[in-house]
Amino acid sequence: MTTTHERVPILSISDLSVDYETDYGPFSALRGITLDVAPGEILGLVGESGCGKSTLGRSLLRLNDEASTRYQGSIHLDGTEVLSLKDTSLPSLRGSEIAMIFQDPLRSLNPVFTIGTQLKNAISLGGITDKRKVHAESISLLERVGLDDPERRLRQYPHQLSGGQRQRVVIAIALAQSPKVLVADEPTTALDVTTQKQILKLLRQLCTDTGMALIFVTHDLAVVWQLCDRVAVMYFGIVIEHGAVEDIFDAPVHPYTGGLLAAVPSLETEKGRPLATIERRHDGGQGGGGWDDDSAEFDAVSPNHFVRKAQTSRVDVERSSNDC
Amino acid sequence: MTAETANDIEPPLLSLRSVSVDFSPGALARMLGASLVKAVDEVSFDVRAGRTFGIVGESGSGKSTTVRAILGLESISSGTVRYNGVDMSTLRGRRRKIAAREMQMVFQDPSSALNPKLRIRHLLAERVKIHRSGEYGNRTTIVRNALDDVGLPHTHLDRFPHQLSGGQQQRVVIALALISRPRALICDEAVSGLDVSSQAQVLNLLNDLRDDRGLTIIFITHDMGVARYISDDIAVMRKGVIVEQRPAEEIFADPRSDYTKTLLTAVPTLPRTYGFTEV
């Protein structure tokens, strides 16, 4: 795994805040996010629903509805400032610099076109025009994502493939223009465990082979432990603890991180013992659980482990089963 | 009603013998060469009262179809389902209704199980009207008790479902089921859509209900960690067949079937167990 000393980030997010305009006034979805990811590295974004992890993933590609979204701070991707790009230059960013895959592969694929049509379309967007080259490239992409019999797959429609195969096709399309960063938003949540294992292995291998950086959004801490190099734990729109996976899973400092870990029923959890539960002060996340300061100050626990300063009492990790 | 040859002194609350559910293709599909799909194939198991019976398996393994067949939501092609020693297919009228009331279902997505237009108070009162109409005058007390049972504060009575978190919504669904005074709760992926902390709340609640009131729980899940944590007995299903069926501890300590082993090795695990003391 890469150490901080020699890391040269390909993507740096600094002091990023994202606000949504809603009918009830502005809603602060992300505040003071500072993170980076280096080539070949896998960064896990983990947290519960509504914590802003998907918003962060989408913001990296500027996929949020621009009419009602306000960005502050900066997203620096390999020398480009994503937030200052004009709308017209976004298509050249998406796909070739940074790509994204989503939870449900069926919704990412068009049901009325064959795999071949969709994959070749993505390849020709990258500038390859010669039909034979496009075909050869599409075969090699399908082979890279581990699909057998690629010639036949190209002629098939999405409904003819299993969930795992579809997700492989989606990954192939995302890789078509060799992006430097891939954002994966819960790509294995809808899959069975055995399929999930294969997809995780594939993603890890792609990062090692091509030096692509992967940002893996998930709610599953066990998956983070299996796959990621670094992790950022998010809560109500802020990062509360981040650093190397080993350090954080070895000794979680923030009570919320500890609570999340203790809430997972693993294969070793003692059966009679109630699981840890976390009660939120504010339902739905409005008001942000009480972090008033927007400063992103972190204490360094170790060179690879940072935890947000103070204000830790806002999270209640409960010992009893279902008190409110 | 014939007497079942039971090994145990106490007969099981629910007993399935060689239950099969077939999905036959329509006329057009038959012409195109589609054949019969055996969604559930000769499944037999006993669920004893006051225990949690887990059914695990991957998507398409027939676990949901099995419990839907128990409730009569799918028609059984062959085999028998006995509830309390009585063949379910012979039950008619009032006795069928009682059986239906006593087995309550909890589904995966609580937000689609709750009417979005009704406040929690009215949702719960409606259930009193349906299943305990004789006590409708006491509905306020019954509704409040039900909320107490699932550990939600009374202030939630005036809220709408969308104002609650997923875990709280699922607890309202369980409160609804409890008003019907069930003997068995059938949970189909009841915690799969929830965050880990909400999932923990619901799992803790189900364990309490089983321990304190002797509620029988049938728990379908694809999550091996959850299955192990909550179940006393587990059946592992694959392609409509039960491949392994033993007490939970034994299955996880010493899986016998290859499929169970494959499933267990595929589960992503944390480096260690985390307790409260370390928090």
Image (tube, rainbow, N blue to C red):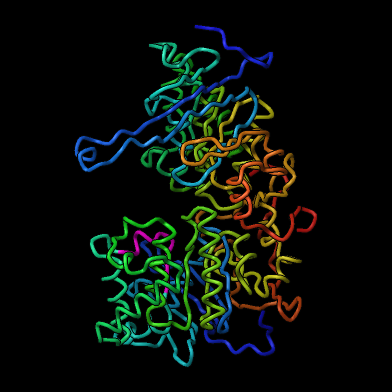
Magenta stretch in the rendered image: A100-109
Q: Which one is nearer the viewer's eye here, B259 or A19?
A: B259
Classify B13 as above or below A58: above
Classify A155 as above or below A17: above
Q: Kindly indicate the quadrant of the structure image that contains residue B216.
A: top right
Q: Which residue is at 54% across, 23% downward?
A: B182
Residue A53 included in the magenta stretch of the image: no
Q: Which residue is at 55% across, 41% downward?
A: B56
Q: Position of residue A96 (x, y in %)?
A: 39, 83
Q: How many labels does the image show?
A: 0
**Residue B165 visible in the shown view:** no
For the C terminus of chain A, the image quarter is top right
Classify B98 as above or below B210: above
Q: Residue furthest bottom?
A: A79
Q: Which one is nearer the viewer's eye here, A66 or B93?
A: B93
Q: Which one is nearer the viewer's eye here, A222 or B234?
A: B234
Residue B241 is left or right of residue B93, and the answer is right
Residue B39 is left or right of residue B17, and the answer is left
Q: Position of residue A148 (x, y in %)?
A: 41, 65
Residue B223 is left or right of residue B159, and the answer is right
Q: Which residue is at 30% across, 78% downward?
A: A135
Residue A103 included in the magenta stretch of the image: yes
**Residue A216 visible in the shown view:** yes
Q: Position of residue A144 (x, y in %)?
A: 45, 74
Q: Position of residue B46 (x, y in %)?
A: 59, 24
Classify A49 as above or below A253: above
For the N terminus of chain A, the image quarter is bottom right
Q: Which residue is at 39% across, 77% downward?
A: A140
